[in-house]
Image (cartoon, grey):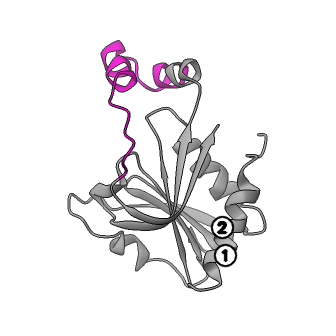
Amino acid sequence: MKPYEFLGKLEHQIDKILETKNRVLISVVGKGGTGKSFFGKYLRNHGCGKFNKRNISVIDDSVMWVDFLYVFRKAVRIKNNIFDELHPFLKKLPKRKKIIFYMNATPWERISEADILLILSTDENKRRERLQRRYKNPEDVNGLLNADNITDYKIKYSCLLKEKI
C-alpha cells in the first residue's frame, strides 16, 4: 500500500502536542466510505512516521486492538450508548501508547474534545464503489451517499487537518 502523503504533517502536529501532554487524541472523521477504517488498519500495521505501531492505539467505532503477549493482538469491544470520553478504552492502555486515533463519523456521541481533528474525504465515485462492496443492499448505499454533509463535528480541538485520500 502506498503510504499516506499527509503523515508528515500529522507527525509534526503530534510532536508539538507531545511537548506539553503525555498523550494525543486524534479524532478521525468523514462520511461512510471515505477510508477511516482502512486508514486505521494502516496505522495499526505501520505506525505514523517516526511513531511506530507500538506507540499507537486505534479505536474504530467501538473496537480497539490491544497487544497480547507482545506478538499477537486481540480485539476489545466496548459498545457504549453513553458519553464516556473513551475512558473504558483508555484505562486498558499501557503508558507507552502515546497516540490514540478514534475513528468515528459522529465523534460527539462519545467524546467532547480531541487534540487533532482529522477530516478525511475522497472522490464520490470511489466512495460509492467502497460502499457498494461493503453493503449489498442498494438502499443502504443510497442512504449513506445521500446523508447530510456534516461540517460541524461538535467537539473541541486544537488542530484541524483536512485530507483527501
- Mark 2, residue position: 13
Q: Position of residue 83 (x, y in %)?
A: 24, 65
Left or right, 69 with respect to 30, comes to right
Q: Nearer the viewer, residue 41 or 155?
A: 155
Specify the farthest residue to the left. Answer: 82
Check if residue 95 falls in the magenta segment.
Answer: no
Q: Position of residue 54 (x, y in %)?
A: 67, 71
- Magenta-colored span: 129-153
State yes or no: discs 1 and 2 in contact (Cβ < 8 Å).
yes
Q: Is residue 20 visible?
A: yes
Q: Is residue 65 above or below residue 133?
A: below
**Looking at the image, which residue is at 76% across and 58% down?**
8
10 Å neighbourhood of mark 2: few (<14), some, or many (≥20)? some
Q: Is residue 75 above or below residue 131?
A: below
Q: Within the image, what quadrant is residue 47 found in?
A: bottom right
> If the image is split into quadrants, where does the N terminus sit?
top right
Amino acid type for the residue under numbered disc 1: Lys
- Mark 1, residue position: 16
SS category of the residue bearing label 1: helix
Give the distance between the C-alpha atoms of the residues marked 1 and 2, in whole angstroms.
5 Å
Q: Within the image, what quadrant is residue 49 found in?
A: bottom right
10 Å neighbourhood of mark 1: few (<14), some, or many (≥20)? few
**Looking at the image, which residue is at 53% across and 22% down?**
124
